[in-house]
Amino acid sequence: ASIFANVPKGPAIEVFALTRAFQDDASTKKVNLSVGAYRTDAGQPWVLPVVRKTEVGIATDELINHEYLPVTGLESFTRAATELVLGSESKALKEKRAFGVQTISGTGALRVAAEFLHHQLKRQTVYYSNPTWENHHKIFADTGFTKLHSYRYWDQNKRQLDLEGMLADLDQAPAESVIILHACAHNPTGMDPTHEQWKQIADLMERKKLFPLFDSAYQGFASGDPDLDAWAIRYFVDRGFELFVCQSFAKNFGLYCERAGNLTIVQQSGATRDMIHSQLTLIIRGLYSNPPAYGARIVSKVLNTPDLRQEWMESIKSMSSRIRQMRKLLRDKLVALGTPGNWDHIVNQIGMFSYTGLNEKQVGVLIKDYHIYLLKTGRINMCGLNTGNIDYVATAINAAVT
Ligand code: PLP
């Protein structure tokens, strides 16, 4: 018998399985609301014009070759990425107590962060929101964390943030627990704490000595303004927390497959920098040796060139405003159809996703009878909606709910 004979088949990853089912569906009415990627009003992926322009420049630049990058990546990229998240006026940057290392997009940043926290700081306990991006659990479990907990976050009845539940659960977390916080545009609920609520979260985390790990996969994509979307992170930094930020440039640059990411480390003082940097270097060396250059070169060029950066800012504004427009249209259409329930949460949520409140049975009806693909939790990607399909989707939701 084969030595592989007893390998069990693993469960399918829902979001990829849905996309496959969508591709195989012959219906002309089909709509994919599952995948976490931007789509234009014509339902197409979008290469940001500034990205296209920059890659053409890179392709013809005789000075660029394909030598290995340093283990911790392209320095001009990590500097720009770290500054993008902390702000150009950041005290932590001026005091040289913050730096970044390049990672394999946001997922890689989370994995490198988890490796460091587990193996260097001996952390065993992590808390993530309920619900959260499903990979959080896997990344920390695979790294070796033994105590994986969730904290309450979403009130399904009220369709809003359950701040009281969140604070009560974090109050029970042992000191030094790693707490994953979504910097903005919470995936999957689209519901972020207000500034006042962030203050309460920070108060509690400071009192209980909990370690903030910000997952920042949507900076600029939520409000259209990268500074506004980094508010919570900068607030925690200003209060003196030592923390990690895991940054992805998949969504805000549309560089999904290029795996451009950054792990930012904020310390109490610069004295610990070289030690941390050397340990991160060893972690990355053992995982994949060094990162890919392509996406990082694009991001670096754009962020470090004022007119290109301005163009990028315009693009993220246009993406986020198209999403907001779809939120309003969907809510208004459901209201106009008299669909039972309150749909205001769709416009109160922010970013790519909406937690619609549709239950598993209703989701089943949408997929089977209407060829509309969404996660069984009722999460939809607002970008899958456009002026060509929104009437069809609203009518289908109305039928599934009524
Ligand atoms: N974190 C959250 C909350 C996400 O939604 C995503 C992507 O969907 C990521 C991290 C990481 O994505 P990537 O590894 O593609 O940058």
Image (spheres, rainbow, N blue to C red):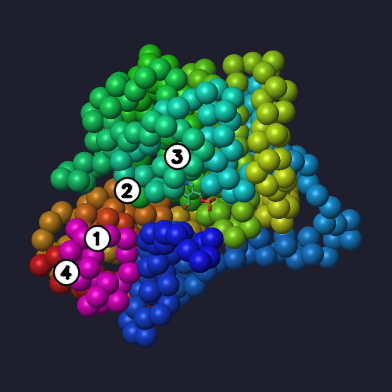
Question: Is there any visible trace of residue 359 in the rendered image?
Answer: yes
State the image coordinates of residue 45 (x, y, percent, origin top left).
Answer: 52, 69
368 drawn magenta: yes
Q: Answer with left or right where residue 236 lies relative to residue 72.
A: left
Disc 2 vs disc 3: which is toward the camera?
3
Q: Earlier in the sequence, mark 3 or mark 1?
A: 3
In the rendered structure, which amino acid carries the disc numbered 3? Ala
Residue range of the region highlighted in magenta in the rendering: 359-376
Q: Earlier in the sequence, mark 4 or mark 1?
A: 1
State the image coordinates of residue 255 (x, y, percent, origin top left).
Answer: 60, 58
In the rendered structure, which amino acid carries the disc numbered 1? Arg
Disc 2 vs disc 1: which is toward the camera?
2
Q: Residues within 10 Å of mark 4 (few under 14, many from 20)?
A: some
Q: Read off the residue under disc 3.
A: 141
In 3D space, how far apart are the residues under numbered discs 4 and 2 (Cα atoms)?
20 Å
Question: Is there any visible trace of residue 223 in the rendered image?
Answer: no
Residue 331 is marked as 1
Q: Read off the residue under disc 2.
A: 189
Q: Secondary structure at mark 4?
A: helix
Q: Answer with left or right where residue 206 lies relative to residue 346.
A: right
Q: Read off the residue under disc 4.
A: 400
Main SS, magenta region, reads helix
Q: Secondary structure at mark 2?
A: loop
